[in-house]
């Protein structure tokens, strides 16, 4: 379903019209015949969402998988990384005033999923393996809700195939494959701006790398809350029911498992990128940290990737504790993977009177630890007690 590997465009056209027309025809035919897998599942994964093609829209395509094409196509980042990449692509579509062609499926990282939908077999094709390790995009997000801000279509929709067919008929006005062209040129240069479809090859690292320069205010930035607030309607409805049952409550997000990683240096000394995280996310330290923000007797909703049963029970000496597992009657009929579960939990946490995150993300947010969330260079000796602080 992806375009052939694009080549960088030079400032001057270099291909004869005939060659370009044949190339476009080949690409469109490749899409139409190679998309059998997507078409077979479009009736279920696209659901009722389908935008009407008027002939006036223009489209932006970044690839059929988040962070792909690129050398990380076979890897799968967590939900947060993929949302950053998806938000970056949506920002560019806003800037170019184009409809974004949304991947119809999202890869689910094995380390973030324990719901049992990932199946491994040596006797399956790469497409079958991808289907087993991914979920429908519209099972996570509401396409209509997103389209209120950024028009989107799914890449397994009938409309997408109509667009490809039309681009084949338009010849050199149909599609361009661009790499290394900034979004200002894509918008202002008539060579690109008048095209029906732009195939925008993303960074070979991750899509979000295209948005790393946040000092460039010509790019329209979507807030971090954009995708979380546009969760699939079923997940929003479930979260609303749970919030109503919780009543007046607070929430904490405790991220432990995937972030508490130590390694030994050449002298055999344990070191960590987050030296205080293990300590700061233990119940006794959580109690000490949050007492200035959350009065005794309050109900606290806890979302965490900590898998030790009863790990947070010591918090019950001061608070009434609630978890998503307490509401399995509401969630179990809907939840098929941990991405859906976290999106629902995130909506619940966003509705809390006081929301305390694991890491401090901005000046106004409350956090359990002062360790920076993004720390990829400084490996430090872990600190487990208050007595060790400052050594």
Image (cartoon, grey):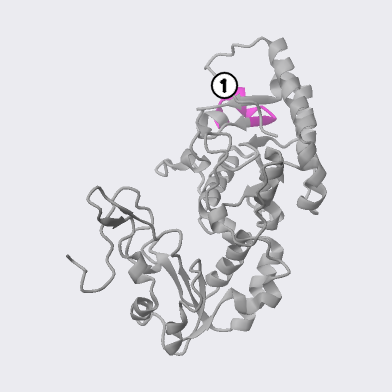
* Residue 319 at x, y percent in the picture: 46, 86
Which residue is pictured at 65% across the width and 26% down the height?
A: 4
Residue toward you, 232 or 256: 256
Q: Viewed as shown, does residue 316 lie left or right of 86?
A: left
Q: Is residue 254 above or below residue 209?
A: below
Residue toward you, 307 or 320: 307
Q: Is residue 90 visible?
A: yes
Residue lying at the far left in this picture: please name it: 391
Q: Is residue 218 visible?
A: no
Residue 376 is one of the magenta-drawn residues: no
* Residue 140 at x, y percent in the picture: 66, 57
Which residue is pictured at 79% across the width and 53% down the height?
A: 47
Residue 194 is one of the magenta-drawn residues: yes
Q: Is residue 352 above or below residue 369?
A: below
* Residue 160 at x, y percent in the picture: 75, 38
Which residue is pictured at 36% across the width and 82% down the height?
A: 291
Q: Is residue 320 above or below residue 328?
A: below
Q: Viewed as shown, does residue 281 lie left or right of 94?
A: left
Q: Viewed as shown, does residue 37 lie left or right of 78?
A: right
Q: Is residue 311 above or below residue 128?
A: below
Residue that numbered label 1 is attached to: 7
**Picture quadrant of residue 92:** top right
Residue toward you, 360 or 107: 107
**Picture quadrant of residue 191:** top right
Which residue is pictured at 70% across the width and 40% down the height?
A: 127
* Residue 285 at x, y percent in the picture: 34, 76
Q: Quadrant of the C terminus?
A: bottom left
Magenta stretch, residue numbers? 187-198
């Amino acid at each position: 379903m992806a375009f052939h590997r694009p080549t960088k465009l030079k400032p001057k056209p270099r291909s004869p019209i005939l060659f370009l027309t044949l190339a476009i025809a080949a690409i469109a035919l490749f899409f139409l015949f190679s998309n059998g897998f997507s078409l077979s599942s479009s009736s279920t994964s696209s659901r009722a969402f389908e935008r009407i093609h008027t002939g006036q829209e223009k489209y932006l395509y970044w690839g059929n998988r988040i962070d792909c094409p690129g050398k990380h196509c076979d890897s799968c980042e967590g939900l947060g990384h993929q949302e950053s990449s998806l938000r970056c692509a949506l920002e560019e579509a806003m800037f170019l005033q184009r409809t974004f062609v949304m991947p119809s499926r999202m890869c689910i990282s094995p380390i973030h999923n324990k719901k049992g939908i990932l199946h491994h077999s040596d006797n399956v094709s790469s497409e079958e393996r991808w289907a087993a390790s991914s979920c429908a995009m519209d099972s996570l997000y509401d396409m209509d809700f997103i389209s209120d801000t950024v028009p989107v279509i799914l890449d397994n929709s009938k409309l997408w195939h109509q667009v490809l067919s039309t681009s084949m008929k338009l010849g050199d006005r149909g599609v361009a494959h661009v790499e290394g062209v900034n979004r200002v040129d894509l918008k202002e240069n008539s060579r690109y701006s008048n095209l029906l479809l732009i195939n925008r090859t993303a960074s070979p690292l991750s899509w979000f790398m295209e948005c790393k320069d946040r000092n460039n205010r010509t790019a329209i930035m979507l807030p971090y809350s954009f995708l979380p607030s546009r969760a699939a309607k079923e997940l929003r409805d479930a979260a609303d029911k749970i919030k109503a049952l919780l009543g007046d409550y607070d929430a904490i997000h405790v991220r432990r498992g995937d972030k508490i990683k130590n390694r030994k240096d050449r002298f055999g000394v344990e070191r960590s990128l987050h030296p205080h995280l293990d300590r700061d996310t233990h119940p006794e330290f959580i109690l000490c940290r949050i007492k200035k923000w959350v009065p005794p007797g309050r109900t606290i909703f806890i979302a965490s990737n900590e898998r030790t049963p009863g790990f947070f029970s010591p918090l019950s000496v001061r608070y009434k504790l609630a978890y998503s597992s307490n509401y399995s009657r509401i969630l179990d009929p809907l939840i098929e993977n941990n991405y859906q579960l976290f999106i629902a939990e995130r909506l619940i946490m966003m509705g809390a009177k006081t929301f305390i995150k694991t890491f401090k993300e901005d000046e106004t947010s409350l956090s359990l630890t002062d360790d920076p969330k993004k720390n990829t260079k400084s490996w430090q000796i872990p600190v487990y007690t208050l007595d060790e602080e400052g050594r």
